[in-house]
Amino acid sequence: MSHYLITLLSAMTEASSLFVAAAGLTLVFGAMRIINIAHGSFYMYGAFLVTTVAGGVIGGERFWLALLIAPLAVAVLGIITELTVLRRVYRSEHLVQLVATYALFLIFGDVALRLWGSQARSVAAPSPLGGSIAIGSGQFPVYDIFAMGVAVLIGLGLWVLLQHTALGWRIRGAVEDREMLASSGTNVALLSTAVFAIGAFLAGLAGAISAPLQSTAPGLDASIIVAAFIVAVIGGLGSVAGAAIGAIVIGLFNTAGVLWAPNWEPAFIYLAMIIVLAVRPWGLLGTPER
Amino acid sequence: MHYRTRRTLQMPASADRTQPAATAAPSPPAIAREPESALRGLARRVGVIFGVPAAIVIILVILPSVLSPLPLLDVQSAVGLALFACATNLLVGYGGLVSFGQGAFYGTGAYVIALAWLHLHMSFWISFICAPFAGAAMAVAIGLVALRTRRLYFALLTLAFSQLVFVIAQQQVSFTGGANGVFGPMLPSFLINPDNAYYFTLGVAVLALLALYKITRSPFGMTLKAIRENPERAEALGVNVFRQQLLAFVFAGALCALAGGLFVVYDQSANPNLLSWTESGYPIFMAVIGGQFSFLGPALGALIYEQSRDVVLAQFSDSQLVFGLLLLLIVLAAPDGVLGRLTRGFALLARRWRAARPGRPGGPGPESAPRDAAHETAESER
Amino acid sequence: MTAGALLQISGLTRQFGGFAAVQDVDVSVWPATIHSVIGPNGAGKTTFFRLLTGILRPSRGTVTFDGHDITGARPHVISRRGLAQSFQITNVFPRLTALESVQIAILARRRRSLDFASLHQRRVTAEASGLLKEVGLHQVADAQAQTLSHGDQRILEVTLALATSPRLLLLDEPTAGMSPFETERMVSLVTRLAKEHGLTVLLSEHDMDVVFGISDEITVLHRGRVVTHGPPEQVEADKDVIEVYLGGEE
């Protein structure tokens, strides 16, 4: 019994990580209609920055510092990216935007190789969160619970932001109808930069939180971007709540896959998406216009 | 009613396509034009449309006598990739359907030949013919599900299908050879000779591209473009959008599988990476780099990609960085692809040329000289 | 049930949750006439048109066209039956030329959209050119649709619908956003189509000069219901109509 509970909790941990990563992606796409492949790079940078700031130090007080610095640094990188590159492709075809962000993905990936090398890095969880708690006859890491908690907080924070703040209304307005928003006096350019910064922040934060959960190595950007996209699409592009549901679905699917057919594990995420989109072509909470 | 042609310069930036030179300048009202004889007109049309591609084909045919085997092999690979890219562009450029899963068909084409050789000892020629049919069959299966979605959902769904096939190919080790794939002497002796292999590849690719070209100019191709522009409107006019897109998807799948067969001629192998989404990304990038709104744009993109990849790999240790920077540069400077920028440059030249020669009677000659066939096809391609 | 009506609409209703956008609407449209639907904003005109063209399915009621029941049928099926629509928001193919756009419509009508070979192209091109000449767009035949003026785009819009050789043409606010000159062009085109070619036209409009100038019959909608209908003189004098327009938002 506790075995299943622990497995379920592991699925939720994975879902938490995916949710925070996908939330930024879906927000940016919803408000700006940009498909940002470099979002995976932002995630990886968040993780690498944590390993740099907090790695190798046992006890990990620096971890909290890293958790603060990494997402902010990534957000700054996001702002720079938006101002220099993205502004030039807003009026291009979606496909051109995709190729542009893919080019950024390549560039960021290579720079990461130069900055952090090709070896995998890991960082230990900070000491208050380092142990594990007993659940029935099994053990479950405390840090995983922390990660889940962070995801829930992020979810709530985003909900508050979108529903109860002026910025949130504007973001939702942009998701609904950009032209209308522009004509109502909102500075769409500034809004775009803000949204993109938030998206990058969330990606960096997701990476930072995940650093103690997995080893950080080159190639993380590619694997996370595919997973984040699938989660965002399953949930319905533009919907943060959808990203949450999508993350849970994928977390469960993957965990089930590892249990029952470990050989086919890489395929499960794709199978999940095919099934969901076959039934609901616009994602679970998506709207048909997109 | 007099329509001012200055209007053509007020297009929004995102839709800044080349204007057909014929409408970019007002039809000369005051200058008398000598009527073209029908024969001259025909000769001019044929010359313009087939001029540059014919020249390219002639050059490609001569190459084996000029190049040594290794660079020739590169050209052979580029020709196969050009077919892959142009076939994908039927969906991406003409149909507005960005499919991130064409690798599934490319790899299937290669695997059909490799596995038929491995398990059934089938003759290469037979399995080569079967490859496009296998691609078409797979496209029917995938298309029936994927084409119910649009835009990014469609792109990711096709990606998912191709990844699924990729995982299957990796898992079924006894059948597919697993991660290593299949390799061995699967080519007939005729194709072992590098010149023969080259000519075979060239011949197949040219024929396939001719067929593809005819299709893009047919009612089918035109309607496909209309669906790209405005699917609801097309449906309201009585077009069965799903059927049209499915047919395009099947045809593209068949040709991508054919390109996969040509890969076997090049490499005598099949491996799972051909099926992955990273492989699927290549023809899309080639289409964007070369120009997705012209027929041969993706072929140019394939050439640029192959050549620059070789140069970058040879010269730079940080190849990924350089490649990324190059890609970014091209995309920012030429959102319509290289061919798009070239054709706009030519159209500008043609306009200036014509403007500088008032009083000259019309007809064939220097006016049509700056145009090339790719330009011609691009003009009427929107 | 009125015999002889080309388009017969009975009890048409469409609910959105508790709100009825269109309620118990009865309209009869006679062949070769121009029938206008008017009403203040929010009266349900656009919903009504969407119900007719298959974009929305009715909650209740029937739509009979030329004797066939087309209630709830899909748009391309309705189009094939001979009921063509021109959209309120100009809805053309931006990067196709005017000529190509009309060719697409003709090909669709002739069921030739799937042709891989261009055997009949010459005939189709000739027909498309002819149609463009008739509506006055032949000089911009090779211009991309998105580069045309607003008035030209609306005319192209109507031409696309015409190219399907419809028996009934649905025009949703055809003169919206047009200058007096462009309005004049559209009006003379529509009247010519009805009078010379026997085309039946059902249109919704805000421009009262146009409506009362060219209509054979007018239906007035208010809050989803039919207030009154009849020839222009009758509607003009109707007290309820005056109240609707003075009391309601415009």
Image (cartoon, rainbow, N blue to C red):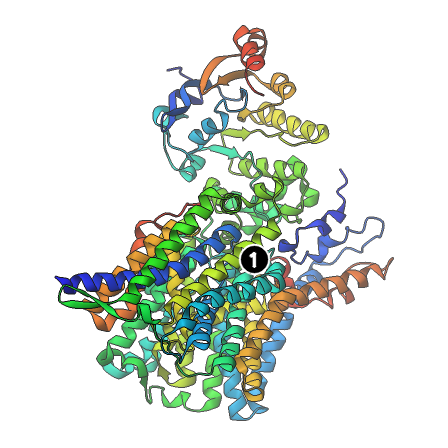
Question: Does residue B13 appear to the left or right of A239 in the view shown?
Answer: right
Residue at 73% in and 47% down = B7
Q: Is residue C11 above or below residue A42?
A: above
The quadrant the N terminus of chain A occupies is: bottom left
Q: Quadrant of residue A10?
A: bottom left
Measured as percent of width and height from the top left, residue B232 is found at: 47, 43
Q: Which residue is mark 1?
A: A93
Q: Is residue C59 above or below residue B184?
A: above
Q: Is residue B166 visible?
A: yes
Q: Residue B301 versus residue A122: which sits nearer the camera? A: A122
Q: Is residue C242 above or below residue A59?
A: above
Residue at 46% in and 87% down = B196
Q: Is residue B295 visible?
A: no
Measured as percent of width and height from the top left, residue A30 is found at: 48, 51
* Amino acid carrying mark 1 in the image: Glu
Residue found at the very far right of the displayed protein:
B359
Q: Secondary structure at mark 1?
A: loop
Measured as percent of width and height from the top left, residue C158 is found at: 58, 35
Residue at 37% in and 15% down = C1
Q: How many marks?
A: 1
**Mark 1 nearby-residue class (10 Å; few <14, some 14–19, many ≥20):** few
Q: Output the chain of dot 1.
A: A
Q: Residue A59 versus residue C45: which sits nearer the camera? A: A59
Question: Does residue B170 appear to the left or right of A206 in the view shown?
Answer: left
Measured as percent of width and height from the top left, residue B190 is found at: 40, 89
